[in-house]
């Protein structure tokens, strides 16, 4: 009996084991939910790499093993500030048995980041999968996108050192092709540099080429490698970017120019370097050997286009240990370095000054209230009727006991009347404050208008915003949009506060918004005009002369012209009116790049009055100052060596930007800033005086512990820690024969510390000469300090190392380029 019991026990054990094995076997097969959908792959960023605070493409592939599916697919990522999450969603459908690939772009704000990918139907999560990035790049990384058919010889671009004394900056490269090259402006902004090398540009779509041009205009550095593969690179390069013509290649066997340029020896092992003969149509030559240009540079908008006469991925350049990176360092320092500070190279620099626009958007004009006389008449009538009149009428009819009926009735009638009178003074729908920047370009009959929009909704709950199809809208542009949720931390970690619906007509949903909560976004669209802008001015004896024709289609109010740190007020210009100007320039100089002093002169300082003391006119003036501050501060990073006269003006015309909130139109208030660049004409024989701020100095080179790594409030500045030199230069228009100039070197750091010398280069004697911080050179000796290229050079020189705790030795701080005031005669 005991043996039988043991046999039964063993049988049970074996049976349970077989059942468990069968269960595990079943689990090993794919199991799909009711939808039959499977997320088969997710590709994030650039081969799994992303830049923190950058926008990232997610390529998602979905297989459908079930019936036809229609719903949404979305990426869930951290919102600005990391406290909550936002969904980036788009409509999604896939046929039975089909496979579909979609691309969603979303911001990623964390290191060691991950996102959730969800498929949604009827507000229910059907399928969800998490994606983890392979690598997160610091926002200060110099990110180089390489458009190439062969990236094997360009790996040296990763790991380059572009650090300053104050900020470590390393380079990282990402290989791109015609498919992975970004088709989204925000994604392309991840890159500080783009290199096109050994790539057939005819395979890149026209839309992506247009995006490339815009990226350079906004401040990027485009480098084009030529050499033996020049034809396939240049033949389909956008015409705007073709700064050179290319002749057949020759071979270099000597590399002295490269070695002198970098200070590093190039050992080629007998390998010759094929180089193209570049005919430079536009720009300057940074490096040449004998009569062969090797590296060129041309400013394009706020960015630069540089051409290499060689293929950057071929021997002997690709294996030149430390030398190839040194070439790139010199190129960066001579182009984008004056305003390069990590991720602030791209348009995120605007975020540093968005507070000004953020405040401007909160301006809503006062609503017209009923007149005081009308209110006095209504209140007086009420007192008389509810009192004496009511009493006398009831007394005459001997019905004084009815007063408990007549008094409430009179109160009700007057209350209804007061409500009707006051109804027009309240907002019953959402209100939009729209600040449009209308920036004209030369010879253009259509422009892109940017409309920054602040929205206030009078109801709490979900706010759904959309615009018309002709508008390109960015609902994520404002980093200052705030959100408050007082729930427990575990709920906050999961809470989705907004949903951005991507597609042909983007929409956004903000959840749990309070009454009159502020939301903002940017709209853009093209506006056509009947005539292009053609205005010009001349400067003679510090007087601005010229003509302005207003063919914008709008009245221009309170116009003024800015040139460097000087301005002239023009006044109103009616539509289609031509006015002649003859205005003295008012100069503002309290130090280098004194934008705030300039704004105080133009707009006054009444902005500092208490808000309650301001009327509509002063509040409008404050709004305009904030708009001008935002524009001028975000555009001062342009490293152009010569300023351009710019006409600014205002109007409140309706630009027909449709804004729909919860399926209803909103009340819109416009304030438009008109920006028109003007030509500066030079009349032969005329005397010209260029004021402070008009000619902008640039960093030519640095030595020792000095580095061109600018403070965003002082573009073009140099950081020095101890011993080092910073050389600045001024490029003077070739039409001007200089008769005298004054240098004013103003820096708070210079006043506080340092053992340094200020030097001016004497081209006639080929030597540096000491100067003071305020230094005037008159007509008798001025020619000695002007180069054949019409340049002036100055140096900030520090020779003594700093002792610990002794600020008088050495130097530690930021040095700005001096300001220059110049007099001359037009040749």
Image (cartoon, rainbow, N blue to C red):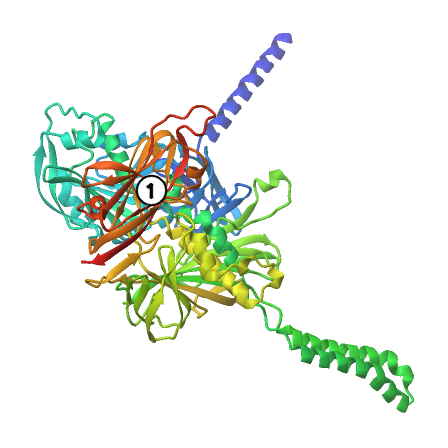
Task: Determine the residue positioned at 45% across, 29% down.
Answer: 807
The local crowd at label 1, few if under 14, some if 14 to 19, many if 20 or more residues have their Cα within 10 Å, is many
Nearer to me, 561 or 127: 561
Residue farthest along the bottom direction in this orientation: 396
Give the side of residue 19 with respect to residue 788, left or right: right
Query: Quadrant of the image for the N terminus?
Result: top right
Residue 388: horizontal and vertical position, in percent?
85, 84
Q: Quadrant of the C terminus?
A: bottom left
Residue lying furthest front in this view?
A: 780
Report the residue marked by disc 1.
338
Q: What number of labels is visible?
A: 1
Image location of residue 20, percent across then percent down: 52, 24
- Tell me if 499 is positioned left or right of 537 in this view: right
**Residue 32 in sight:** no
Residue 487 x/y as whole percent: 64, 43
Looking at the image, residue 504 lies above or below residue 16: below
Q: Nearer the viewer, residue 249 or 265?
A: 265
- Image coords of residue 458 (percent x, y): 60, 62
In this view of the protein, which residue sits in the foreground, 594 or 316? 594
330 or 122, nearer to the observer = 330
Numbered disc 1: secondary structure: helix
Residue 142 position by quadrant: top left
Left or right of 58: which side holds 263? left
Tell me if I can see residue 341 in this picture.
yes
């Amino acid at each position: 009996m005991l043996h039988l019991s043991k046999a039964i026990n063993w049988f049970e054990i074996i049976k349970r084991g077989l059942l468990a094995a069968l269960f595990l076997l079943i689990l090993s097969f794919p199991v799909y939910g009711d939808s039959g959908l499977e997320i088969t792959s997710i590709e994030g960023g650039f081969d799994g790499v992303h830049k923190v605070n950058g926008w990232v493409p997610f390529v998602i592939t979905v297989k459908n093993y079930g019936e036809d599916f229609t719903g949404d697919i979305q990426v869930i990522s951290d919102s600005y500030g990391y406290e909550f999450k936002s969904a980036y969603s788009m409509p999604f459908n896939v046929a039975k048995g089909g496979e579909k690939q979609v691309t969603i772009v979303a911001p990623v704000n964390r290191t060691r980041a991950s996102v959730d990918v969800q498929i949604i139907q009827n507000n229910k999560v059907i399928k969800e999968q998490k994606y983890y990035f392979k690598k997160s790049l610091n926002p200060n990384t110099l990110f180089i996108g390489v458009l190439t058919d062969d990236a094997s010889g360009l790996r040296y671009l990763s790991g380059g050192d572009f650090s300053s004394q104050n900020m470590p900056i390393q380079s990282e490269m990402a290989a791109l092709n015609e498919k992975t090259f970004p088709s989204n402006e925000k994604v392309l902004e991840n890159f500080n540099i783009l290199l096109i090398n050994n790539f057939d540009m005819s395979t890149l779509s026209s839309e992506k080429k247009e995006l490339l041009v815009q990226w350079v205009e906004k401040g990027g550095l485009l480098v084009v490698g030529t050499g033996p593969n020049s034809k396939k690179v240049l033949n389909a390069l956008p015409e705007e970017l073709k700064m050179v013509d290319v002749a057949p290649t020759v071979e270099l066997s000597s590399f002295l120019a490269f070695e002198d340029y970098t200070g590093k020896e190039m050992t080629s092992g007998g390998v010759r370097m094929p180089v193209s003969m570049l005919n430079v149509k536009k720009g300057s030559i940074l490096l040449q050997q004998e009569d062969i240009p090797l590296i060129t540079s041309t400013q394009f908008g706020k960015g630069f286009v540089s051409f290499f006469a060689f293929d950057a991925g071929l021997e002997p350049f690709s294996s030149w240990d430390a030398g190839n990176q040194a070439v790139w360092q010199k190129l960066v320092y001579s182009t984008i370095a004056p305003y390069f500070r990590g991720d602030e190279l791209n348009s995120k620099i605007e975020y540093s000054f968005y507070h000004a626009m953020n405040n401007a958007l909160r301006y809503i004009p006062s609503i017209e209230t009923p007149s005081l006389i009308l209110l006095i008449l209504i209140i007086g009538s009420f007192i008389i009727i509810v009192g004496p009149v009511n009493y006398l009428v009831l007394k005459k009819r001997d019905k004084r006991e009815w007063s408990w009926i007549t008094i409430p009735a009179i109160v009700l009638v007057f209350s209804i009347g007061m409500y009707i009178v006051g109804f027009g003074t309240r907002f019953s729908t959402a209100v939009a404050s729209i600040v449009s920047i209308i920036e004209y370009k030369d010879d253009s009959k259509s422009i892109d208008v940017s409309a920054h929009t602040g929205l206030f909704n009078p109801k709490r709950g979900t706010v759904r915003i959309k615009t018309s199809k002709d508008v390109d809208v960015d609902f994520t542009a404002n980093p200052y949009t705030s959100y408050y949720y007082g729930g427990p931390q575990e709920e906050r970690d999961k809470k989705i506060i907004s949903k951005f619906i991507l597609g042909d007509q983007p929409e956004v949903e903000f959840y749990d918004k309070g009454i009159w909560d502020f939301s903002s976004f940017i709209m853009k669209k093209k506006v056509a005009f009947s005539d292009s802008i053609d205005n010009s001015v001349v400067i003679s004896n510090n007087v601005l002369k010229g003509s302005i024709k207003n063919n914008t289609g709008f009245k221009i109010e309170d116009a003024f012209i800015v040139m460097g740190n000087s301005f002239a007020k023009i006044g109103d210009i009616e539509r289609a009116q031509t006015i002649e100007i003859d205005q003295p320039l008012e100069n503002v100089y309290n130090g280098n790049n004194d934008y705030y002093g300039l704004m105080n002169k133009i707009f006054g300082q009444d902005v500092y009055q208490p808000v309650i003391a301001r009327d509509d006119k002063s509040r409008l003036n404050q709004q305009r100052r904030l708009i001008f501050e935002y524009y001028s501060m975000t555009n001062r990073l342009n490293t152009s060596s010569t300023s351009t006269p710019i006409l600014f003006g205002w109007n409140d015309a309706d630009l027909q930007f449709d804004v729909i909130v919860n399926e209803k139109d909103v009340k819109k208030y416009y304030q438009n800033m008109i920006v028109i660049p003007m030509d500066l004409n030079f009349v032969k024989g005329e005397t010209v005086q260029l004021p402070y701020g008009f000619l902008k100095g640039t960093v030519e080179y640095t030595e020792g512990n000095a580095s061109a790594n600018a403070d965003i409030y002082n573009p073009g500045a140099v950081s020095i820690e101890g011993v080092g030199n910073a050389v600045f230069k001024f490029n003077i228009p070739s039409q001007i024969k200089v008769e005298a100039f004054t240098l004013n070197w103003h820096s708070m750091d210079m006043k506080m510390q340092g053992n340094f010398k200020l030097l001016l280069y004497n081209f006639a004697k080929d030597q540096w000469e000491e100067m003071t911080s305020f230094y005037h050179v008159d007509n008798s000796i001025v020619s000695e300090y002007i180069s054949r290229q019409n340049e002036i050079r100055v140096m900030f020189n520090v020779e003594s190392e700093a002792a610990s705790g002794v600020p008088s030795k050495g130097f530690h701080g930021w040095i700005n380029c001096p300001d220059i005031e110049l007099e001359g005669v037009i040749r």
